[in-house]
Amino acid sequence: MSAGSFSGLSLESPRIFGIINVTPDSFSDGGEALKVSDAVRRGRAMVEAGADALDVGGESTRPGAEPVAIDEEIYRVVPVVQALVDQGHTVSIDSRRAKVMAAAIAVGAKIVNDVTALTDDPDALGVVSDSGCPVILMHMLGEPGTMQDNPQYDDAAADVFDYLRRRVEACEAAGIVRDRIAVDPGIGFGKTLDHNLDILGRLGMYQDLGVPVMLGASRKSFIAKISRGEGVKDRIGGSLSAVLSAYAQGVRLFRVHDVAETRQALAVWRAIEKN
């Protein structure tokens, strides 16, 4: 089981990161929080529902997404990050660009969450190392625009493990100490349904990396493929199933859209487990 802490959050209990996409085109909630006031209202509601941190992103990384200009990304996220920090909330910045990371950190973001595991921007490692911020390293095969074209692995769960191990080592070599690192196997990022299920069924192996593991499976398309083709906002049940399975395998960090439901499901699961 996971232990210790991440960014000051004890991992004796599961920790929930509420998703705030300040984008017009994210797969689940694009356009719903483009205004700063809407994003801040959403963040406050998520904290009231039980979120431990708020993950703010200004570039969609859904399959087929187009890149966003760096200045536009900064314009979208910095006012939201600053407003949420000013209200006393813990904020992570979801970006693959060093300038965006630095701008968000400058106004109080405490965590960097990078879908490219600090590989997309050559300055990203330095920004994170110099800032002292914790970082979440995610696995993605290829670019968002093409990652779902024909993803292939010899052994999906093991290949992702090896990639994340190398990224943890690269971070340590750059001066980012291990207790500032978490990993995310990147469900849906350059992976078929079978790849996703293989990884979800073997999440326990990622404990061997010696760092906290985050799961981001909320509302993703694999749920509909397994079930009845449900629309994005009708995938809460599948999202919760993934969370509970992951928790049973030692995962303690969860990035979700549906905070209250996730918190409730975990509370019931843990109460049964302890009985």
Image (spheres, grey):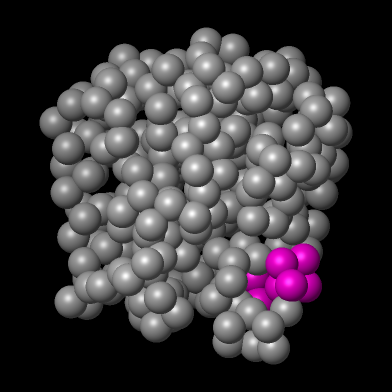
Where, by quadrant of the figure, is residue 207 drawn? Answer: bottom left
Secondary structure mostly seen in magenta is helix
* Vertical order, 262 against 122 (above or below): below
Q: Residue at x 47, y 37 (%)?
A: 67
The percent position of residue 270, horizontal first and vertical second, equals 65, 70
Q: Is residue 52 visible from the viewing direction of this image?
A: no
Report the number of numbered marks.
Answer: 0
Q: Magenta residues?
A: 231-241
Where, by quadrant of the figure, is residue 171 drawn? Answer: top left
The percent position of residue 174, horizontal first and vertical second, equals 18, 26
Quarter holding the N terminus is bottom left
Q: Is residue 237 magenta?
A: yes
The percent position of residue 44, horizontal first and vertical second, equals 82, 35
* Vertical order, 31 against 152 (above or below): above
Q: Residue at x 43, y 52 (%)?
A: 145
Left or right: where 29 falls relative to 196: right
Q: Is residue 218 magenta?
A: no
Q: Is residue 135 visible from the viewing direction of this image?
A: yes
The percent position of residue 57, horizontal first and vertical second, equals 59, 36
Q: Residue at x 74, y 72 (%)?
A: 231
Q: Residue at x 58, y 22 (%)?
A: 72
* Residue most extreme to the top: 106
Left or right: where 103 falls relative to 28: left
